[in-house]
Image: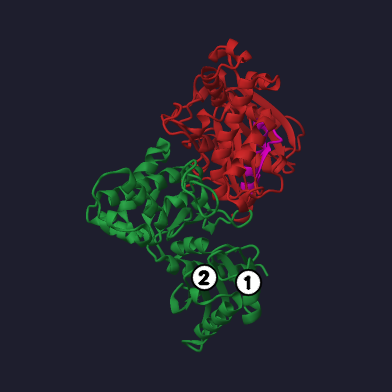
Chain colours: A green, B red
């Protein structure tokens, strides 16, 4: 049986899966990305993991391709460019490295694109051809799927709406701009919003006892569940900012749905309901009710692994059909 | 020789062209849309124009299809829905009507989608696969081309960025919302901006002598060319508002270029330069310089006629390949 190895490279951990044509996961592995200080050591260890995952299980299994999702991955060129959170040099020719090592085709995509595709294969977007997939983690990642294919853009950067400016002269972003969407709508964004609210209001809140460095989005979520007004408002403000930007995205693309994934999306209706309401209020009447804001059904890593595998399978089919 | 008849239905005039496979225009015709008070009379006259255009010229020419671009055209359904500026009922089954009358396949698209495609066939977007096409007329129309195909969206409404909200509690729009982009960036938007500036400033201006009802975008352009400060600022404000919204569009889609067409776009560099500058200032560094704001090379009607013809030719090929 033919299988592909899919890899989701992340700043904290790198995950691997062995996936068959039916998108069943036949085995998994993991690597602690933070344990490596340079690229060579990382690839040495990653190659070992690929080999042992490839050789595990049924002897009838044959690895025919490798699919990789990575931050700052440029699909067309097969390189990772300037990934600040990885122990990599500025430019890593990852596809070439894998193809030389394993002598099978390797395919690269951006982590957010892989996750978007994975949701379509095994998640809540099954059967949909047009949707937007948003990951709310430390930052805000996005993949746009149009007619079943993820949109790359001219230089493989489409979907960077985490860095769309949502507030003039707003919060400082690591990218050098101010007011980027991800400084408001992300796990780190909601922490900033909670602190802003604490400064702004006199409302009692359990969050007043916590230092910024100790505060997590999860704590804000728990406080919100316990009825903490500051925490509840932090969620509604976050969701409304998201809803405003999504109104623009939806007016441009008219997708069937927008999916929210990642740690912060676990807050569920605390985010989706006010976001949907705000979004609808800023849409033309003929758009309202057409595009739903929904929750991803998969863990982001899981979606990215399935998505990276799906790219490998699709490309293999294209190669075999058009040699 | 096989030809298609393409039709661009507009609120003021309806234009027709006979187009061959090489996208050469072999003949044209025109109808005054405002001369008709009901749908039946309009179609009767339009059918006559199609017939006489079809029968004109070489006897070896055979009309094999009809391509139609129209406001509020829903491509998937072949109907025009709620076109306020046309003497039509709420729902017009235009494709069925043409197919019954002429016994050849007819294809419908939105006027803005047709113009976007036409620019790719015969205009400044030749050779580009990914671009955004914006028409600045009374309103702001838009067509998004991705991988050579115009984006329809789930209900044929993609690209409605004329009604993206650019200013909270901003100008009243005919759509019922406030602050829509087209209330700022369009021929009518720049008139409102000029009047706002006259109210705001004490700067002398030739525009102070003109009533709102008498003022046209062309007059503002001429005043700007003559160095009128109010007129110049009206253009730079308009362009900057456009640049801000385009930064969001480009961050999402990363197209190769954005084209400006329509009456207001004749202002050329008065619009493109400040728009490009503002847009670049709100883009991630890695995006800057990648997407150019350019001027359309065609008249909007011309682009729409060529685009409607291109849809007919493409669909015919699809039909003949996959019967």
Helix, strand or loop at mark 1: helix
Helix, strand or loop at mark 2: strand
Of B27 and B98, the residue lying toward us: B27
Question: Which residue is depicted at the point 66% across and 79% down?
Answer: A100
Image height check: is A144 above or below A3? above
Examine the residues drawn in magenta and state their main secondary structure.
helix
Neighbourhood count class around disc 2 (C-alpha, 10 Å): few under 14, some 14–19, many 20 upward: many
Q: Quadrant of the N terminus of chain B?
A: top right
Question: Which residue is depicted at the point 53% across and 66% down?
Answer: A85
Q: Quadrant of the C terminus of chain B?
A: bottom right
Per the rendering, the mark at residue A9 is 2
Q: In terms of image quadrants, where is residue A121? A: bottom left
Q: Where does label 1 land, which residue?
A: A95
Of B137 and A286, the residue lying toward us: B137
Which residue appears farthest toward the bottom when viewing the image? A59
Neighbourhood count class around disc 1 (C-alpha, 10 Å): few under 14, some 14–19, many 20 upward: many
The chain letter for the residue carrying disc 2 is A
Q: Give the range drawn in magenta.
A: B292-316
Horizontal and vertical percent position of residue B25:
73, 35
Q: Do the residues under discs 2 and 1 have CB atoms within 8 angstroms? A: no
Res B320 visible: yes
Q: Distance between the residues labelled 2 and 1?
A: 13 Å
Of A304 and B169, the residue lying toward us: B169
Q: Is residue B71 magenta?
A: no
Res B115 visible: no
Horizontal and vertical percent position of residue B259:
65, 39
Query: Left or right of A287: which side holds B118?
Result: right
Horizontal and vertical percent position of residue B189:
54, 26
Image height check: is B210 above or below B177? above
Per the rendering, the mark at residue A229 is none
Q: In terms of image quadrants, where is residue B203? A: top right
Disc on the earlier residue, 2 or 1: 2
């Amino acid at each position: 049986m033919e299988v592909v190895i899919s890899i989701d490279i992340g700043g904290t951990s790198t995950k691997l899966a062995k996936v068959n044509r039916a998108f069943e996961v036949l085995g998994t592995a993991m690597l602690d990305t933070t344990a490596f200080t340079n690229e060579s050591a990382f690839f040495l260890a990653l190659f070992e993991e690929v080999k042992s995952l490839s050789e595990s299980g049924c002897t009838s299994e044959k690895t025919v391709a490798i699919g990789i999702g990575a931050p700052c991955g440029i699909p067309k060129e097969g390189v990772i460019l300037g990934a600040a959170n990885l122990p990599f040099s500025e430019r890593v020719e990852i596809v070439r490295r894998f193809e030389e090592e394993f002598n099978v085709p390797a395919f690269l995509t951006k982590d957010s694109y892989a996750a978007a595709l994975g949701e379509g294969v095994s998640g809540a977007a099954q059967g949909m051809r047009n949707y937007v997939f948003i990951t709310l983690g430390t930052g805000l990642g996005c993949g746009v799927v149009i007619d079943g294919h993820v949109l790359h853009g001219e230089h493989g950067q489409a979907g960077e709406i985490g860095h769309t400016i949502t507030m003039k002269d707003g919060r400082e972003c690591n990218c050098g701009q101010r007011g980027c969407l991800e400084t408001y709508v992300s796990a780190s964004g909601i922490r900033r919003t909670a602190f802003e609210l604490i400064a702004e209001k006199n409302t009692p809140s359990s969050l007043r006892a916590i230092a910024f460095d100790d505060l997590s989005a999860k704590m804000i979520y728990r406080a919100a569940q316990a009825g903490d007004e500051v925490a509840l408002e932090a969620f509604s403000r976050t969701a409304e900012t998201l809803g405003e930007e999504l109104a623009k995205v939806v007016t441009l693309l008219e997708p069937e749905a927008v999916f929210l994934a990642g740690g912060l999306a676990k807050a569920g209706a605390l985010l989706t309901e006010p976001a949907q309401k705000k979004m609808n209020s800023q849409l033309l009447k003929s758009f309202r009710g057409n595009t739903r804001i929904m929750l991803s059904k998969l863990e982001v890593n899981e979606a990215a692994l399935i998505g990276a595998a799906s790219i490998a399978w699709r490309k293999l089919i294209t190669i075999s059909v058009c040699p």
